[in-house]
Image (tube, grey):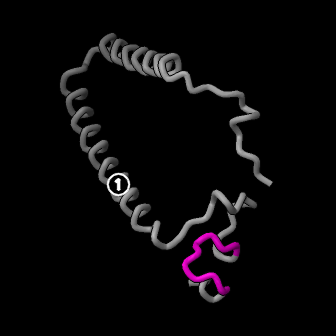
């Protein structure tokens, strides 16, 4: 790879490879041995995405067959919106993970 040509074999964050801005080197070093972990994460994400698409298609077919009236469609949309908002608000209140923005944000030079 280009990192070996530049004298840094196996170092995937050498500045000549890709440039995503100036970041702190102590936190952003990636090595070759980490690639299988990232590949596994990608495979798992792809499989979960395929499962989501399959479930969504079955749900769509069910909705097309059984939900025909306009007021039922409206009720479904309102129910999904209410459930989503409720889950979001409950997670904010129960997790209590809020911090001051200035302290939580990383410093990029």
Vertically, is 22 above or below 95?
A: below
As for residue 77 lying within the magenta part, the answer is no
| Residue 64 location, quadrant | top left
As for residue 8 lying within the magenta part, the answer is yes
Residue at 69 percent of width and 67 percent of height = 19
Vertically, is 82 above or below 26?
A: above
Q: Which residues are magenta?
A: 6-15
Query: 9 or 59, which is in the foreground?
Result: 9
Q: Which residue is mark 1?
A: 46
Q: Which residue is at the far bottom?
A: 5
Q: Position of residue 10 (x, y in %)?
A: 55, 78
Query: 63 or 99, which is in the foreground?
Result: 99
Q: Is residue 28 left or right of residue 109?
A: left
Vertically, is 25 above or below 97?
A: below
Residue at 50 percent of width and 23 percent of height = 95
| Residue 96 location, quadrant | top right
Q: Position of residue 41 (x, y in %)?
A: 39, 56
Q: Quadrant of the N terminus?
A: bottom right
| Residue 75 location, quadrant | top left
Q: Which residue is at the far right?
A: 109
Query: 28 or 53, which is in the foreground?
Result: 28
- Crowding around mark 1 (Cα neighbors within 10 Å: few <14, some 14 to 19, many 20+) is few
């Amino acid at each position: 790879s280009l990192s070996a040509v530049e004298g840094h074999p196996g170092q995937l964050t050498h500045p000549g490879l890709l440039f995503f801005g100036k970041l702190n080197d102590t936190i952003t070093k990636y090595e070759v041995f980490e690639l299988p972990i990232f590949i596994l994460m990608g495979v798992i994400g792809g499989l979960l995405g395929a499962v989501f698409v399959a479930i969504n298609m079955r749900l769509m077919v069910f909705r097309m067959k059984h939900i025909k009236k306009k007021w039922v469609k409206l009720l479904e949309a309102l129910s999904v919106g209410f459930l989503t908002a409720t889950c979001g608000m409950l997670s904010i209140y129960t997790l209590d993970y809020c911090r001051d923005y200035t302290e939580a944000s990383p410093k990029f030079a």
